[in-house]
Image: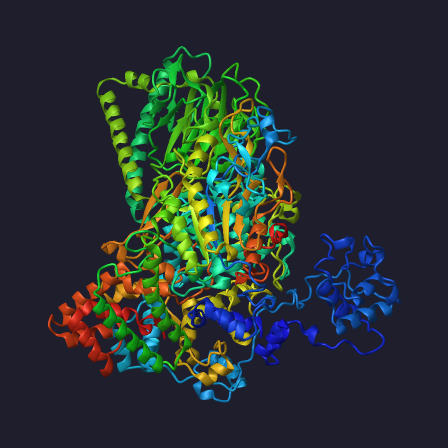
Amino acid sequence: MRFLSIYRIIGNARALLFCAPLFFLVEPSLADEAGDNFFDEQVAPLLAARCAECHHEEEPEAELNLLSEATARKGGENGPALVPGDPGKSLLWKRVAADEMPPEDPLDDEEKQILKKWIASGASWGTDPVDRFRYTTDKRAGYDWWALQPLGQPEIPSPRRGRRIRNPIDAFVLSRLEESNLSFSEDADPRTLVRRAYLDFHGLPPTPEEIEQFVADPSELAYQQLLTRLLDSPRYGERWGRHWLDVVRFGESDGFERNNPRKDFWHYRDWVIEALNADMPYNEFVRMQVAGDVIKPNTAEGFAAVGFLVAAVHNTVVGGSEMMKRQSRADEIEELVGAIGQTFVGLTVNCARCHAHKFDPISQDEYYQLSAAVAGLNHGTREIQQPGQREELLELQAKEKDVASRIAGIRATIREQIIEKRKSIKTPAIELPEPLASWEFEEDFKDSIGNLDGKPQGGARLENGALVLDGKDDYVITAPIAREITEKTLTALVQLDNLDQRGGGVISLQTTGGGIFDAIVFGEGEPRHWMAGSNVFSRTQPFQGTEEKEASSRPVHFAIVYRKDGTITGYRDGQLYGKSYKTGSQPFAAGGGSLLFGLRHMPPGSNRFLAGRVLQAQLFDHALDEEAVAAVSGDPRNYVAEKEIVAFLKGEEQASYLMLKEQQQKLADEIIAASQAARFVIYTNVPRSPAETYFLNRGKVMDRGELVGPGTIQAIAGLPGDLGLAMDAGDGERRLALADWLTNEKNSLSMRVMVNRIWHYHFGSGIVDTPSDFGFNGSRPTHPGLLEWLSGQFIDSAYSLKALHRLIASSTAYRQSSHFHARAAEIDAGNALLWRKNPYRAEGEVVRDSILSVSGQLNLASGGPGFEDVKIEPNKGTTYYRPFDTEDPNLNRRTVYRFSPRGERMALLDVFDCPDPSSAAPRRSPTTTPLQALSLLNNAFVLRMADHLAVGVKKDVGEEQVEQQVDRVFKLILGRLAEKDEREPAIRLVQQHGLALLARTLFNTNEFLAIP
Amino acid sequence: MSQQVHRREFCQWNLQGLGSIAILDLLRRDGLLGQEGTGAGGLHYPPRVKRAIQICLVGGMSHIDSYDYKPELSKQQGKSLPAAVKPDIFFGKVGLLRGSDWEFRQRGESGLWVSEMFPEIAKRADMLTVIRSMVSDSANHTPALFVSNSGFQANGFPSLGSWLSFGLGSETESLPAYVVLPDARGGPNGGASNWSSGFLPSEHQAVILRGGDQPVRDLFPATPISELAEQESLSLLRQLNAKHLARSGQDQQLLARIRSYELAGRMQLSVPEVSDYSAEPEKVREEYGLHDPVTEDMGRRCLLGRRLLERGVRFLQLFSGGPIAGSPRASWDAHESVKDNHTLEAGRIDRPVAALLNDLQKRGMLEDTLVLFTTEFGRTPFAQSDADKVGPGRDHNRYGFSCWMAGGGLRPGSVFGETDEVGWKAVKDPVSWNDFHATIMHLFGVDHRKLTFYHNGIQRRLTNVAGDVVKGILA
């Protein structure tokens, strides 16, 4: 039985506190009379454990719910279940006594006695209703589950052989060993230890010089200095970043049918590596991955960090029907809920999508609350300037602004004079705000103020001072905007061909290609209504304005004002249109945006075209207030065309004005060029406003229950799962609250899970050997006290991962030999108790990087776009990734910098168990297969590296010096000299077949492949 | 023995190094097979088959034009689908009903209806067990293909072949347990994800067998190494490993790795041998269609398939169809014209598959081999065209379609399940992919509920939380 095995493994009385189901050890009371707490202590756990799988409140089997007093007394479809005082007449007892219930797994005698005694003594009820999550049973975890409890403060044990203790880790480990009559192995020799440390911390072997340095002085001080060097090196982040990428299912293509590459997703990988190298406190590391774009808005760092949210596969071919769309969305949200639960708190929350979690105390409601917390999820890209280049750009922008303001000054004066001069004295000229660009469509498609001239596409044409659009393929696109747009106002005077069109764009500000846009759109969301269109409706909500009845018979002025705080307001004919609302704001980088008329966004197609006439349109790079909108919506004759101004100016004035305009144009070009050169596109989460989240009955997308607000799980002791959010809270608020919850100091699971991950990678197996599952289905801790103690240390060190590494690596447990001992193995075959250091086979990345390193070919260029060792072949709607091998220093970078799509890859990585990036791999499944042997013997890369190594060694020690060559190759690859009986055949091999063959042979040795 | 200790053992690289055969042996010796939750499972019942070959049609074969005879559909040609609700289909264009473009006839002694689309396979109708009531969770190619392979719509789950490799290992140590032979025109959408071992250990991933000098990746040195050099290199390797083993205290994991080099050597001998079918008689090659450029690709793979099965490969997958989209299509995705497309696709495989059935039977191998003929979904009885037209193409249909099996443990020459009178939805005995997989597992002597692997909080299995063995097709 499961429980007994846990007991055996844990075995010590204090540790039992961590495995919770104490009641299970308690013999049922032998007293005839049931005591006061009899129901709560014995009957309720029994009902919860053995009956509630089916007879619960959600969908009670046979309509019998045994968890509440009223329903239990009422009975089910077969009539009353209980006759108090008379078990013989109680259906419940009869079915149980006949071993019919629970089906296939009848109660044992002790359990039966409890039930019988309860009914016989009157079946009195206790706490009502019985919470089936309250107790841990032999079938599931309850709220009392060990991992859900606050962190314990265990006493540090005092084992007998105390002299092996270097720090408290050893006290915990050794005391467990001694209980099984085992002890630590001797310390590893310095040569082994230094090799272990390098491979473990950097994923690269030490150089012969690094080895000899430590072998010459293996003192404690030297070891601590070694650890400092290892932790300070950028190689540390590359090695441990790779571990994290395994956990978070990092892959660089979409998967599914199209499997398009994600060329702009390396930012997340770099962010992880840099965060680890900088020893970013773990709580911040978590917060940034969940809400970095909210914590550091509009920064490359923020956008990169939340790559976590979109690291998984993403289905881009969803199908046309409502059900297919909902299904696909629900699947994607489940994936993310699963990833958050497993990665940060080691709980498989995703298992509660269709029913309450079968093993852990997580309800279906909580699943949907957590779904609501991340309901803004949206795969997309953001554009941002490279930080380094920002200065130059700012300078150019300042210059441009200066020129623009001088032009504006002249224009304002002249315009005044022109308006003055016009007969106009009827109405005083209104103080009009200055647009960034304006199109009158009188004689051309040009911007009459700046340089955002339009280019007609399709059959777009001008007629009677209006842009005429046929709604089929006509539109106008402008040059890019040289200025960064944060706040803005879009306006247009427009007449529609008909009021039943759905989705045409009047004026749209979009990024190149249309991935991001804000637009005045007609009839898309609701027929005959105006709306603020945006990419995947991320900034779109209904204005709830009046139905449009006039725009087909006369021109209507429509304006949308976008404020920096995310407020969006519509105005029709200068009057507020419906209500304004607040979502996120979307900045458009300098040089990154252009305008469209007659098309909602690029690419052209479907319902995005507008059928009608645009008489005039304007773009403001600021948010107009109500008065200003009213003003610009007035008589367009108040506008003065640019050419009028030029014509008005005379002689020198005109020349200098035109020169200014030219200068502005030049600056604009420079800004665009600079910004395009300096721009990052980052694949990231581009949140949409969270759609309403419904409880789905049995998880079925077409069977909606009640609306669910954002929240998370309740089960962690002392930490409420209510995030304190309103039902309609914005996406940013939701994720920020979730990030806070995940990193709350009371979130004991969060610390335990991360401490255990670190331990897992150092020892090849965790204290809990299911690193992403601390629930009932996961493993129990082998050293519960140690896990608690380390978690406490982790908090005390302000969540420093580097401090944790040092603590672990300083222990005897870590520094002992990995030598195999048959006697110890008889007692503990799996080395769960750590009587030796687990040796393990190097991961595929380490094999590859080590070969590169010892061959002198490793290219340590770090960061940036990954190197591509696959040919990307789009083929009829899907994408193939074909591995190729060629001599190219760029391909000799560390494997963590490999572009890693979901598909084929070089055999060496495949056969050495690099996980498929399609799913999370919190622990790898290492194998030993003939295919590994074949790859390591025959792969073109391996053979080429052997050649390089040979060439390098010969250069170093001399072309004819075979003995020295052999010595050097042994030292490089194995970190030691050949022993006599190894050296002779090695020399013979080199003499007859060349040095490269010796290198290839050594690459294949167990010694080279092991992390000792 | 506790599950805890078990899991530890499986996850150490040492024991896996012995190969899954050794794991099974070990477990059998210790009497640990067949216990609830032991993870690796194994043979739960006496198996009816030992190996399988799957012809995997990519794109969606029209059942109503091939194996599901619907006279009523032809009668109703040009009428609307008699359904109250608008069909939930991929492209949303529902034209009028269209009768089959092929003539159906009853075949052999069984009288099984097979159309003229497959004249050669039709001659072997008495060997077939046709399931006419297949249903799928998805009408979207790649998720549907994934479901048919792994039971799940997303990337990242182990395929049927990987599960069989994990559960049963290979019958031979010198060939991989699971082999894939893709269409010469390209791999299916999703590529290697289709035969991925997902979260199972990587040794259970399919090995792609190709033509040329390196039928398996890295089988031979990428740059030539003389035989003598190779021998002496391996001899030094053995010596170094032996010394290291002694120094490390005779660790089992190191022994396993030493042994893997012996197995690699065997593979170097056996793969070229099996790939070279020049020794096959001329008559056999002709039967498989190797002389005709249309059938050559599938013919070669069917013949190679038989040779691999003979030598103990557990599970073989032959794809018919490459990537989905494009023009002309290189798959069964007949949106434009079923007649044109299926004539071409069926023409490529009919003769080779029929030859494979014949050959297996002649050699007595059909007794304990399973031949699977599957498609990710079927096609609609109505045309994919405007609502008032009978266009020549058909859209995806996940509600009812046909697959067939042949071989050990089945009722040959029989039909299971029914679609409605026009072939739109399965109405009698619907069979899901979970059911289909459960049945295959059953034929291999494996209880699909017991072959599980722990991954991220769940004891995962091929059939997720569903699947019933389709008893109606079993002998």
Direction from residue A1004 to residue A488 in the image, left or right: right
Q: Is residue A687 visible?
A: yes
Residue A802: horizontal and vertical position, in percent? 40, 68
Quarter of the image for residue A993 reads bottom left
Quarter of the image for residue A145 reads bottom right
Figure quadrant of the N terminus of chain A: bottom right
Viewer-proximal residue among A556 and B390: B390
Residue A169: horizontal and vertical position, in percent? 47, 78
Direction from residue B318 to residue B242 in the image, left or right: left
Direction from residue A369 to residue B210 in the image, left or right: left
Viewer-proximal residue among A262 and B64: B64
Please give the count of numbered marks on the rendered protein.
Answer: 0
The residue under the point 18% across, 76% down is: A987
Asked if B165 appears above or below A733 in the picture, the reply is below
Q: Is residue A511 visible?
A: no
Q: Return the residue found at the far top.
A: A423
Residue B284: horizontal and vertical position, in percent? 38, 49
Asked if A625 appears above or below A893 in the picture, the reply is above
Residue B149: horizontal and vertical position, in percent? 50, 50
Viewer-proximal residue among B46 and A940: B46
Asked if B16 appears above or below A575 in the picture, the reply is below
